[in-house]
Image (spheres, helix red, strand yellow):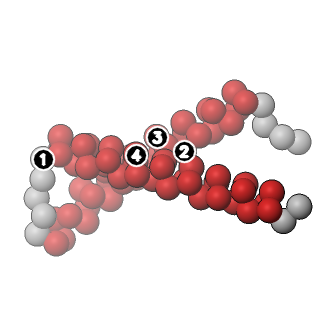
Amino acid sequence: MSQTRLQSAVESLANVAIGYAVAVASQMLIFPLFGIHVTLADNLLIGGYFTLISIARSYAVRRWFNRRREWQR
């Protein structure tokens, strides 16, 4: 059974939100271990940049696999 477009959109948004939270929490835990000390605002901004990069990467990989599937037909 496939998802509706709304369900797919909700899943994508949830995935992005969870990824963002994990990125920021990870940075706050890992950065100090390497002597990197940044403010919460900077951590949120860095997490935002990583999230945008992740969205672009995910989109590119998905499109590449879709094209690859079309070539195999």
| Of pointers 2 and 1, the one earlier in the residue sequence | 2
Q: Which mark is residue 55?
A: none
Q: Which residue is mark 2?
A: 15
Question: Where is residue 73, by image quadrant?
Answer: bottom right
Q: How many circles with numbers are drawn on the protein?
A: 4
Look at discs 1 and 4 and give the one toward the viewer. Answer: 4
Where disc 1 sits, the SS reads loop
Please state which of residues 49 and 33 is positioned toward the viewer in this rendering. 49
First in sequence, mark 3 or 4: give its number: 3
Residue 52: mark: 4
Query: What is the spatial separation of the Cα atoms under label 2 and label 4, in whole angstroms?
Result: 13 Å
Q: Going by the image, does 49 lie left or right of 68?
A: left
Secondary structure, mark 2, is: helix
Distance between mark 2 and mark 3 Cα atoms: 6 Å
Indicate the secondary structure of the residue bearing disc 4: helix
Judge the density around disc 2: few (<14), some (14-19), many (≥20) Cα neighbours within 10 Å: few
Which residue was labeled with disc 3?
17
Relative to 73, residue 1 above or below: above
Query: In terms of sequence position, does the residue under pointer 3 or pointer 1 come before the other?
Result: 3
Question: Where's residue 6, x and y in %?
Answer: 69, 27
Q: Residues within 10 Å of mark 3 (few under 14, many from 20)?
A: few
Q: CA distance from mark 2 to mark 1?
A: 25 Å
Kind of residue at disc 3: Ala
The residues tagged by marks 3 and 1 sit, at their Cα atoms, a distance apart of 20 Å
* Left or right: residue 54 compared with residue 65: left
Which mark, by number, is residue 39? 1
